[in-house]
Amino acid sequence: MRPKIVLFNPIPSTISRRKGVLPLALLSIARGLDAEKYEIVIIDEAVESFPEEVVQDALCVGISAMIGYQISSALKLAKRIRALYPKVPLIWGGWHPSILPEETVDSDFVDYVIRGQGEITFSELMNALEGNKTLDSILGLTYKLNGNVKSNPDRHLSDPNGFPPLPYHLINMNKYIHASEFGARTVTYLSSIGCPFSCGFCAEQVVYRKRWLPLSPERVISDFKHLKEQYKIDSIIINDSNFFTNETRVAEICKNMMSEKLNMKWGNANGRTDQLVRYESETWQLMCDSGLQCILTGAETYDDGILEIMNKKATIEDTFKMTHIANEYGIKIKFSFMVGLPMANRKVSVEEEFDSVIEFINKLYNVNNKNHFLLFLYTPFPGTPLFRKAIELGYKSPDSLEAWGDFREGLNHASTPWVSMDLAEKVYQVSFYFPFISNSAYDIIKQYPLFVRWMLLPFERMLYMIMKFRIKRKFFDFPVEFSMIKLIFKLLKRKI
């Protein structure tokens, strides 16, 4: 009987999403393993509950987690496994364990931490566990040895083109294929890892050390063809941290999508304003012709001075210029903003900053009323430059894995002393409005069967009018519609 490896993806929030984001991190780990040698079981809590009996006779349980609720959920499972199967090793990976490996492995419910890119490190650890071999030669591994925490040297990042395609057959793809604003059968996809920039709030630079490693255009097209032929996918959501780093690569992908007649829409590809405004008009046309629907970009704020504090290396002028260019080609933009950065000498209050961001959002919305917006409160991520500034200004950082699990309310809830709970609730409220005013909710509903559209569209249109008025007038008092939606979710035993 083949040794069994169980890989677990904890639910990322209190919302139970039945369809959506593929567990790409676990699929990446799985592709680094010998499928003929191991029985690989992937369990994603976002779409299914964890059957504890699957751990019986398992070689290990691997867990991927980010800061917040995923840690809390993962710890609950790890505690149950430790009680039922105390000899089964618990291996953690993902962003949070990679950023704070020693603190993570110090938990009683963590035996090993895989730091950063994990395909090779995890595979070598499996070989060591099977053969009771020493661990000191496994790069990128943190573990306990004789009661002490030991971290082996970092592993150099590997070219992702050297790994086999993701083993989608290990999961039930029907649980992830979903209707989106781009099509009726949409899945998520990762064409590169890392980012060469060093924004002060972003932990990407900590995990991937400011490197960007892309799949080749040929590999991307091969993957797209497989998804289309095997699973009838008609649209792709790109999950890269920076898809548009290399213009030549982007152009080749677009050309090949058209030459292969894929006829797939794609969107939410992440890019920087300062890079995209320098793209040639021919490349913009190729992106449009190949089916690009939406670009995700971190506009971040309304003020060049705040962009400098972030070390964004972009300007407000770049944001406006990109908005107009994208509009010329019929491509909408999903702008990401944040408020509440750690600033020692604030020129305006956080509340005034919020008002100015909403005013700036209205200007971008006027260019294209299909543009979408995301608004977050600044959240201090360990290892980033602004994290140190937040500590200096009074932020109290969690000091254990368990404490980070309690840091669970995500990017729209107050975690710093200079942001009030009232403002945090307002940010949360406004974030809920954006999918309606941009018609994203409308576009998704249009993908549903006729009778579902008939029931939902009048309600959606009513919310659209109310929310558009609130954003335009910056009037957020007496949010009856927001309270009503929250009540509906509460009755359904879900929380938004």
Image (spheres, grey):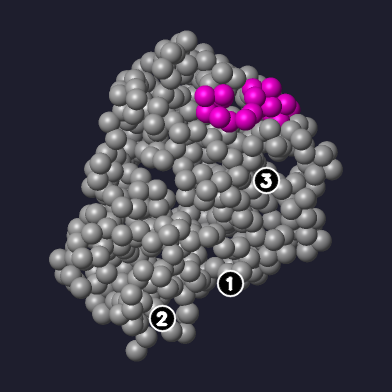
Disc on the earlier residue, 1 or 3 = 1
Disc 3 to disc 2, C-alpha distance: 37 Å
Question: Would you say 170 lies left or right of 299 here?
Answer: left
Q: Amino acid at mark 2?
A: Tyr
Task: Tell me if residue 180 can be seen.
Answer: no
Q: Residue furthest left?
A: 83
Residue 164 is tagged as 1
The magenta stretch spans residue 317: yes
Residue at the image position 41 percent from the left and 81 percent from the top: 38
Name the image quarter holding the N terminus.
Answer: bottom left
Number of other residues with Cα within 10 Å of mark 3, as a class: few under 14, some 14 to 19, many 20 or more: many
Which residues, given as a range, are shown in magenta? 307-324
Task: Tell me if residue 220 can be seen.
Answer: yes
Number of other residues with Cα within 10 Å of mark 1, as a class: few under 14, some 14 to 19, many 20 or more: few
| In the foreground, 232 or 43 | 43
Residue 245 is tagged as 3
Residue 389 is tagged as none
Q: Amino acid at mark 3?
A: Thr
Q: Main secondary structure of the magenta part?
A: helix
